[in-house]
Amino acid sequence: MIEARRLVELHAAERIWPRREALRTDLAARLAEMHEAYAAGDLRALIEADRAFHATVVDAAGNEILAELYQRLRDRQLLIGITSFRLSPGSAERAIAEHADQLAALDSDDPRRWLAAVAAHIDKVADVLRTLR
C-alpha cells in the first residue's frame, strides 16, 4: 500500500504544482477538519480528513485512472490510520504537523520543498507501520 501511495501521491503532487493556488483553500479546509477532529477526540474523523487531504491532491492531478486506484486504497488507509493513531502515541499530532508542513511547502516558491514534504509524510507513515508489526 505504501508503494502505491508513493507512486500515486508523488506523481499527483508533481502534476498539481502549476495549479497549486487553486488547491490551497481546499487543503487548508481539510487541515482545519483534522484539527477539529483531533480536538474532539474523533480518530475516525481525523483519519477521514487526512485521507481527504491526500485525495484532494490526487484528484486535482486530473488522472481519473490514478484517482480511482487511489480511492480503492481508501478503506485500507482508514483502517491502518486509525490503528496507528491508537497504537502509536503522538502519531496523530505528527500527522497534523506534517500536513501543515505540506501546506506551508505548497505556499512556497519551491516545488522541491513541496515534493519533499509529501514524500517525507509517506515515509514517516511507513516508519510508524513498521514499528507496529
Image (cartoon, rainbow, N blue to C red):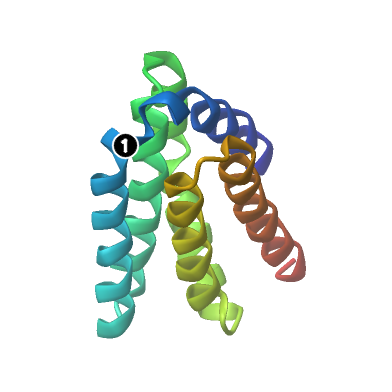
Q: Is residue 129 above or below residue 57?
A: below
Give the residue at x 39% y 62%: 47
At horizontal 65% and vertical 46% (from top left) the residue drawn is 116
Is 39 or 83 nearer to us in this picture? Answer: 39
Q: Which residue is mark 1?
A: 21
Q: Quadrant of residue 10?
A: top right
In this view, 53 is above or below 72? below
The amino acid beneath tag 1 is Glu
Number of numbered markers: 1
Task: Tell me where residue 120 appears, x and y as whole percent.
Answer: 66, 53
Where does residue 66 sit, x and y in percent of width and height? 46, 21
**In terms of depth relative to the viewer, which is nearer, 61 or 89?**
61
Q: Residues within 10 Å of mark 1 (few under 14, many from 20)?
A: few
Residue found at x 42% / y 44%: 54
Q: Is residue 97 above or below residue 51?
A: below
Q: Is 121 situated above or below 26?
A: below
The quadrant the N terminus occupies is: top right
Q: Position of residue 37 (x, y in %)?
A: 27, 73
Q: Residue at 43%, 53% (x, y): give it.
A: 103
Q: At numbered mark 1, what does the secondary structure look like: helix, strand or loop? A: helix
x then y, percent, for residue 41: 31, 83
Indicate left or right for 6 with 53 as reference: right
